Structure formats: structure tokens, C-alpha cells
Image (cartoon, rainbow, N blue to C red):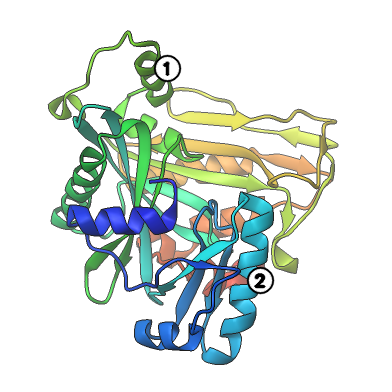
Amino acid sequence: MGDKDHARAIAVEAGVPVLPGSPRIQADMDVDLAALANDIGYPILVKATGGGGGMGMKNVMCQAELDSAVQAALQLAGKAFGESAVFLEKYITRARHIEIQIFGYGDGDVIHLYERDCSIQRRFQKVVEESPAPEVAESIRMAMAEAAVKLAAHQRYAGPGTVEFIFDTQTQRFYFLEMNTRIQVEHPVTEMVTGLDIVRHQLELASGVFEKIAQSEVCHSGVAIECRLYAENPEKDFLPSPGLLNVFTLPETGSHCRVETGYRPNDRISPYYDPMIAKLIVWGATRAVAIEAMQDALKQSVIDGPKHNVKLLQAIMADPDYIAGKVHTAFLESRKAVLINTP
């Protein structure tokens, strides 16, 4: 399931809807790329079969961009993931990115821990996540959860994982995107709304000393939001900003505010790794309360030294469309100029 191309085939076999796409394309293959792309229909995404976190993905709007995008993705895939293999997939222009947290016990027994909306992204990498997904019908959320459980059960999956879907806001249909066969950055969102310690349960399962959690025992309460703090410059296309953290102050933690970081003041941010330096996770009884809590948490976050995205996150939390739950995967790109220039 960790290989995107193989995972698509497994999803089809399990009866889970997938987007139109191509077979695996490798560097040494003689492939009519134009014919494959025309069958799928533009715009398309070129995706590394072993990619993650948005790496190895190229958006292609027309045939003139196709060859160079495929070659660039193949080269990146070989360097980053050890295999020069990609595939083409239909790109939904007005989409939501919604994922289901699951936990499997290796015997076909799988539970879901509800969904997270991860639609606010830059370069196909998530910036804000929340649960439940705003402005999505309960019937659709539950259909996604059932599809995720069905897929993981089909593979007798063991441990925590995330089944990701693209939700077409125009047709109200969802499609399997990929599965992350690991703990994800945004797993605290799920822990905040369910009260379950996913990492602890993973360790217990690995040790062989565990008690299964029944689906009926999994409850969803309130709203949780996570913001990722990045050492990057939003004004320069989110270019990473390594350097010395002269000041690094984060909000006080408590039952409704969680902070995760690996940095302290006077640490130096390396240019060789992902520029995320902290995660802020808040909980509220309602979405309005959770947004207000995140606004307060961001106000308490003070960073001096590298460029960072705290001001941008504050602008997102205050944006009328975000507050109304009108989010989509092009939200940040389409509103970047307005958000960056928000006082």
C-alpha cells in the first residue's frame, strides 16, 4: 500500500473508486506519454510511485509541459525514493483533500478514527488540518470511512495508517488518492477529537500485548485544528529559510492546546531537512471556538531569526472563506497575495 501505483490497483480490486490514471512509467520504458495523457484528460498530475509529503509531484496543464514534467519527476523519484518510476493521474481543479485515520490488527479487523480535512496546502504539502471536515455531508464522510476500512481490511493491514481521498466539490464524489502506511504529522488532530493515543496503541500492537478497540468505542467530540509552523518565506514562494532561532516562543500547553516541536531557542535550522519547526494543535467544542483558540495560540508564537509562516497562518485563521469552511486544495495558491498582505 506504500507504493502509490500498486495501491491504486489494490483499491480497484477492493471496489474503492480511484481517479483515471496511467500504468507505471519507468525511466527506461518507451511510452507514448501524449496518448496516455489524452486518454486521462488535462490537467493531470505526474506522481512518483514511492513519493510522500508532496515530493515527486508535478502539475501538468497541457501537452507542451508533459515531457519535461515526467523527466523531472523521474529524476527526483530516483534520487529521493530509490526508484525512477511515476504514473499519471487526473487532476481535480476544485477539490478537497480528506483523509481517514484507520487502525488495523493484521487479521482483517480494521477500525476508523474519523477524518481530517487537509485541503490547505502549498506545493502539495499540508499546512492546516482539521477534524471534522467542514461543509461535508455526514453521509459522504461516513462513506469515505467505510471505503477506507474496506481497503485496509482487504489487505489485512496492521497498525495505524491513513487512507487519503480527493473529494470533487462539484460532483460530490470522492476518489482514492493514496495510503500512508505510517503515523502522519497530523495524527494529533485525531487524538484530540477521539481521546485515543494512536502511538501508544501502535506500540502495544507491536509488542503483542494489546486490547482491540471496537468501532463502537470510537467517539468523535468537538473540533481540532492543527497549524504547521515552517521556517520558510511565504513572500518568496515558500522558500525554506534555514538559520539560527534567536527567539522561539510557543504557547502554553494544556488540555485544549498541544504543541510539538524538536527545536529550542538558539538552535540552528538545517537546510537539509523539511522546514517544519513546530505543530500547534487546538481543540474546541465548536469550530468557531477552535478557530479562536488557534488564533490565540498563533499570537503567542514568537519567532526571530529565520523567515516563517506565522503571520500567514494568522491570516488564514481570520479569512472569511476559511471561517465559512470554504476550503479546497487551491485555497492557499489562489489567495496567497491577499493572505500575505493581510495586516
Q: Residue at x 49, y 23 (%)?
A: 254
Residue 97, image x, y percentages? 38, 59
**Quadrant where the image shows the C terminus:** bottom right
Residue 112, image x, y percentages? 24, 37
- Judged from this view, the residue extending furthest toward the top is 209
As drawn, is 161 to the left or to the right of 26?
A: left
Q: Residues within 10 Å of mark 2 (few under 14, many from 20)?
A: some
As drawn, is 260 to the left or to the right of 234?
A: left
Residue 183, image x, y percentages? 46, 34
Residue at the disc numbered 1:
203
Q: In the rendered picture of this protein, how many numbered marks are placed on residues?
A: 2
Image height check: is 318 above or below 106? below
Q: Residue at x 72, y 51 (%)?
A: 308
Which three-letter amino acid code belongs to the residue tagged 2?
Ala
Q: Residue at x 25, y 34 (%)?
A: 156
Which SS class for mark 1? helix
Work out whether residue 55 or residue 71 is closer to the camera in this orientation and state it.
Answer: 71
Select label 1 or label 2 by which is in front: 2
Residue 79, label in figure? none
As drawn, is 98 to the left or to the right of 230?
A: left
Residue at the disc numbered 2:
72
Which three-letter amino acid code belongs to the residue tagged 1?
Leu
Quadrant of residue 162 within the rendered picture: top left
Q: How many angstroms separate mark 1 from mark 2 (CA)?
A: 38 Å
